[in-house]
Amino acid sequence: MTKHQIYKMSVAKVYPHYISKAEKKGRTKSEVDEIIRWLTGYSQEDLDARLENQTDFETFFAEAPHLNPSRNLIKGVVCGVRVEDIEEPTMREIRYLDKLIDELAKGKAMEKILRD
């Protein structure tokens, strides 16, 4: 089976779109970073390094220090697909991130987005 193209896409290529989506709705880059750190366990320095090094999504999630166990509480639809129904692990992680950014852009409170 062929892997989806997004797996080899650099996180840094999509990251500005996450920021833009959030800022258009009055949210901040620091909130986007907080979401990514919560989801993956990367420190801000590690996240910045991954972006600078053009790390692809597959590697980004495979090498994440600590995928948050509460991420399994993320439910809903992204791109017409329910995130909780995605079976392929890497795609599910990518869609978790997409869903969290969507929630941020829709004005959801950070304490609700970060399901702890």
Image: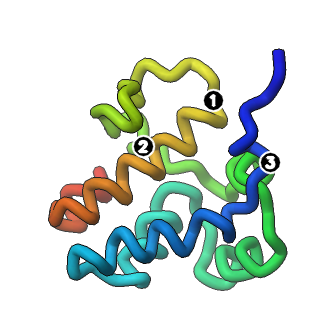
Query: What x and y, as percent, mark residue 54?
Result: 80, 70
Q: Foreground residue, 14 or 73? A: 14
Residue 25 numbered mark, or none:
none
Q: How many marks?
A: 3
Would residue 112 be seen by someone viewing this image from the given angle? yes
The residue that appears at 28% across and 33% down in the rendered structure is: 76
Earlier-in-chain disc, 2 versus 1? 2
For the residues bearing labels 1 and 3, Cβ distance under 8 angstroms: no
Amino acid type indicated by mark 3: Lys
Residue 4, quarter of the rendered image? top right
Query: What x and y, as percent, mark residue 90?
Result: 65, 36
Considering the numbered disc 2 on the image, is that residue within a helix, a strand or a loop? helix
Q: Which residue is mark 3?
A: 8
Locate the N terminus by quadrant: top right
Query: What whole-number distance in Å separates the C-alpha atoms at marks 3 and 2?
Result: 22 Å
Residue 41 lies, with reference to residue 82, above or below; the image says: below
Q: Which residue is mark 1?
A: 89
Amino acid type indicated by mark 1: Pro
Considering the numbered disc 1 on the image, is that residue within a helix, a strand or a loop? helix
Residue 71 numbered mark, or none:
2
For the residues bearing labels 3 and 2, Cβ distance under 8 angstroms: no
Q: Is residue 36 left or right of residue 51?
A: left
Query: What whole-number distance in Å separates the C-alpha atoms at marks 2 and 1?
Result: 12 Å
The residue that appears at 50% across and 22% down in the rendered structure is: 86
Residue 75 lies, with reference to residue 27, above or below; the image says: above
Earlier-in-chain disc, 3 versus 2? 3
Q: Dot 2, crowdedness within 10 Å: few (<14), some or many (≥20)?
A: some
Would residue 63 be seen by someone viewing this image from the given angle? no
